[in-house]
Image (spheres, helix red, strand yellow):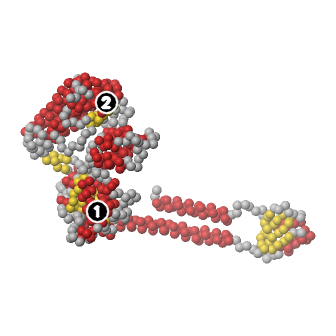
């Protein structure tokens, strides 16, 4: 709603309320009986009047039956003389008690006109002028505040309602060890300055999305018990020239006033991209903002006590001037959590939830390889939502396992009902994936097989690693490609042809085979990496590949990819033909039950796997 219209409605409402009050006070609620002097004489002669009270020219009349009335006499004339002149009976008049009372001054008779025509208009106009002045001041202040930094200050002690320390951050042991020195400097700066040591000006936290960069930065502020100014890189640049630089200056000035303090710039790559990067990369305002950050970091004195923490998941595109010594001196890499860290993260995110006795965080951690801290927080939250939806009073292990699949693949699509034929095809497809994975070397164990649709998948086979792997071999890659092709191979063996359900498997298998040849050097072409990838900045995440090889080599690459794909498909076919009876058995069980867990699957294949 328009503020001016809002104020107008407010004023009208006030006027209506004041008018109502005046009407109640000025006009009495009960009406009085008014009689003429002639009628008064007639009533006295009839013996009906008990008493008359004279107040100035007003007469208050009381009858014998306790009724009351009012009347008026002529100004300057006595009541007795007036009544005698009008022919009143003297004997009857003597029976009436006549009393004189000082005339009352009617307050509202002069106050009401003064309020309505004098004070009230002044109040109304004054309110309008006050509103207009207030709005104009707000507009002027917004113009001046436009160059103020939009940093959020998390309390004088570096935290908001809940203080975050290193205890609240599971895993990231090496990263926390690196940051302990920063915390110690913020607590005891004189110890380092006395030795002539310079603490790093800036610390760059590097890691994929959700690993805990922001959480770790807040933990540093919580441990050091200092103010924590948080701002996103995208908040500096506006459509007006010079605003970004002005906000940077204001941010650093605020931090110096609050020193010792921490400035945290999230998504540093939004303003820290490589300058002069070519088409679409020469955004002058963004570059001026970056230049101002570089100047401010150089301007820090040893005694300033301001530390800059920044986070990014794209360190490769940052300007070299940001990363030189004296600016972001330290680069701390945050790795995704391993199985032990995942278990601790789940405990932290579940501490405020009522948990059942069957909760097994170790099993949940084993089923979530590759999950970041944010993913695990989402799993714990989804588990609580599932339990609440079922009107349960606690969260059990069943909800956690269901939440993992929901986060991985999406919710169950119970309305997506397959026909009997399609359900049979899906059962053989998923059984093919599971059996090829079981009998190929260096593959992960099958945790669950299902033909219940989730997300975009009509069925799925979940494989969870028994241990964390940092490096992989060609054998492992080929086994994974064969597993991808196991579904369509099983369809061909059973039905003589394949369906469109294998499209995603074929895409993933082809991409992996091409990477084996072009990136990992795992082909007969030798230990050579083919193709130079270059990011097109003006297209965001788009990557273009510059060819650094001839057409002849391109043909050989295609041939090598074809050899890998066909070899993996042949291996999958041999396994499924050899274990055809087992394939039918697993597919039939899957067709009937729709879901097979790890224990049941291992019973089915017991004895077949040597």
Q: CA distance from mark 2 to mark 1?
A: 52 Å
* Image x and y of residue 419, in percent: 34, 26
**Above or below for 101 versus 595:** below
Q: Earlier in the sequence, mark 2 or mark 1?
A: 1
Q: Quadrant of residue 120?
A: bottom right
- Residue 249 image offset from top left, x and y in percent: 29, 67
Query: Which sits in the foreground, 206 or 473?
Result: 473
> Which residue shows up at 18% across the image and 63% down it?
325
Left or right? Give the position of 193 relative to 517.
right
Query: Could you say which disc has been placed on residue 183 in the image?
Result: 1
Using the rendered view, name the quadrant where residue 524 is placed: top left
Residue at figure coordinates x 82%, y 69% from the top left: 52
Q: Is residue 560 visible?
A: yes
Does 585 appear above or below 200? above
Q: Residues within 10 Å of mark 2 (few under 14, many from 20)?
A: some
Residue carrying label 2: 600
- Residue at 25% of width from left, 25% of height from top? 582
Q: Residue sitting at 55 percent across and 69 percent down?
A: 123
Q: Is residue 585 left or right of residue 42?
A: left
Q: Position of residue 378 (x, y in %)?
A: 35, 46
**Residue 219 at x, y = what percent?**
32, 58
Image quarter of the C terminus: top left
Q: Is residue 242 above or below residue 530?
A: below
Q: Is residue 245 visible?
A: no
Query: Seen from this angle, which residue lies furthest right?
Result: 91
Q: Give residue 163's mark.
A: none
Which one is nearer the viewer's eye here, 474 or 538? 474
Number of labelled discs? 2
Residue nearest the viewer, comparing 50 with 263: 263
Q: Assign a secondary structure to mark 2.
A: helix
């Amino acid at each position: 709603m328009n503020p001016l219209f809002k104020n107008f409605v407010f004023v009208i409402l006030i006027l209506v309320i004041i008018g109502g009050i005046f009407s109640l006070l000025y006009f009495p609620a009960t009406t009085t009986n008014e009689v003429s002097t002639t009628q008064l004489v007639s009533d006295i002669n009839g013996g009906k009047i008990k008493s008359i009270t004279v107040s100035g020219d007003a007469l208050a009349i009381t009858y014998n039956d306790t009724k009351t009335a009012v009347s008026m006499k002529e100004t300057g004339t006595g009541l007795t003389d007036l009544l005698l002149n009008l022919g009143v009976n003297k004997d009857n008049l003597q029976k009436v008690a006549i009393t004189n009372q000082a005339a009352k001054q009617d307050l509202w008779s002069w106050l009401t006109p003064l309020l309505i025509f004098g004070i009230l208009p002044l109040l109304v106009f004054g309110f309008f002028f006050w509103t207009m002045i207030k709005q104009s001041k707000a507009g002027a202040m917004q113009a001046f505040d436009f160059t103020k930094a939009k940093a959020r200050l998390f309390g004088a002690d570096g935290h908001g309602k809940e203080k975050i320390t290193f205890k609240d951050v599971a895993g990231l042991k090496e990263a926390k060890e690196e940051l302990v020195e920063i915390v110690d400097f913020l607590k005891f700066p004189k110890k380092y300055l006395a030795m002539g040591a310079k603490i790093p000006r800036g610390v760059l936290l590097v890691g994929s999305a959700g690993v805990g960069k922001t959480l770790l930065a807040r933990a540093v502020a919580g441990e050091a018990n200092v103010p924590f100014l948080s701002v996103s890189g995208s908040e500096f640049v506006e459509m007006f020239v010079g605003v970004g630089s002005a906000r940077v200056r204001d941010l650093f000035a605020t931090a110096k006033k609050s020193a010792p303090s921490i400035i945290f710039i999230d998504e540093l790559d939004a303003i820290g991209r490589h300058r002069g990067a070519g088409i679409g990369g020469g955004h002058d305002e963004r570059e001026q903002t970056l230049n101002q950050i570089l100047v401010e970091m150089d301007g820090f004195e040893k005694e300033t006590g301001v530390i800059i923490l920044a986070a990014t998941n794209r360190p490769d595109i940052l300007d070299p001037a940001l990363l030189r010594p004296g600016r972001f001196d330290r680069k701390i890499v945050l790795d995704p959590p391993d199985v032990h860290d995942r278990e601790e993260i789940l405990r932290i995110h579940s501490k405020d939830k009522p948990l059942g006795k069957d909760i097994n965080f170790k099993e949940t951690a084993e089923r979530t390889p590759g999950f970041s801290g944010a993913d695990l927080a989402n799993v714990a939250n989804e588990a609580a939502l599932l339990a609440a939806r079922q009107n349960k009073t606690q969260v059990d292990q069943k909800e956690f396992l269901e939440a993992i699949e929901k986060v991985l693949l999406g919710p169950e699509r119970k309305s997506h009902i397959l026909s009997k034929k399609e359900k049979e095809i899906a059962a053989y497809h998923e059984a093919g994936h599971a059996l090829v994975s079981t009998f190929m070397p260096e593959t992960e164990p099958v945790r669950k097989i299902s033909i219940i649709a989730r997300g975009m998948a009509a069925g799925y086979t979940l494989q969870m690693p028994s241990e964390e792997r940092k490096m992989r071999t060609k054998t492992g890659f080929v086994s994974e490609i064969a597993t991808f092709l196991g579904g369509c191979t099983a369809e061909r063996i059973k039905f003589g042809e394949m369906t469109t359900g294998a499209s995603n498997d074929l895409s993933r298998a082809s991409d992996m085979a091409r990477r084996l040849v072009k990136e990992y050097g795992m082909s007969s072409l030798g230990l050579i990496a083919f193709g130079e990838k270059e990011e097109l900045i003006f297209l965001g995440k788009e990557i273009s590949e510059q060819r650094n090889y001839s057409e002849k080599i391109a043909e050989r690459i295609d041939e090598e990819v074809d050899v890998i794909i066909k070899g993996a498909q042949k291996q999958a076919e041999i396994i499924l033909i050899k274990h055809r009876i087992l394939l039918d058995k697993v597919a039939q069980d899957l067709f009937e039950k729709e879901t097979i867990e790890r224990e049941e699957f291992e019973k089915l294949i017991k004895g077949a796997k040597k």
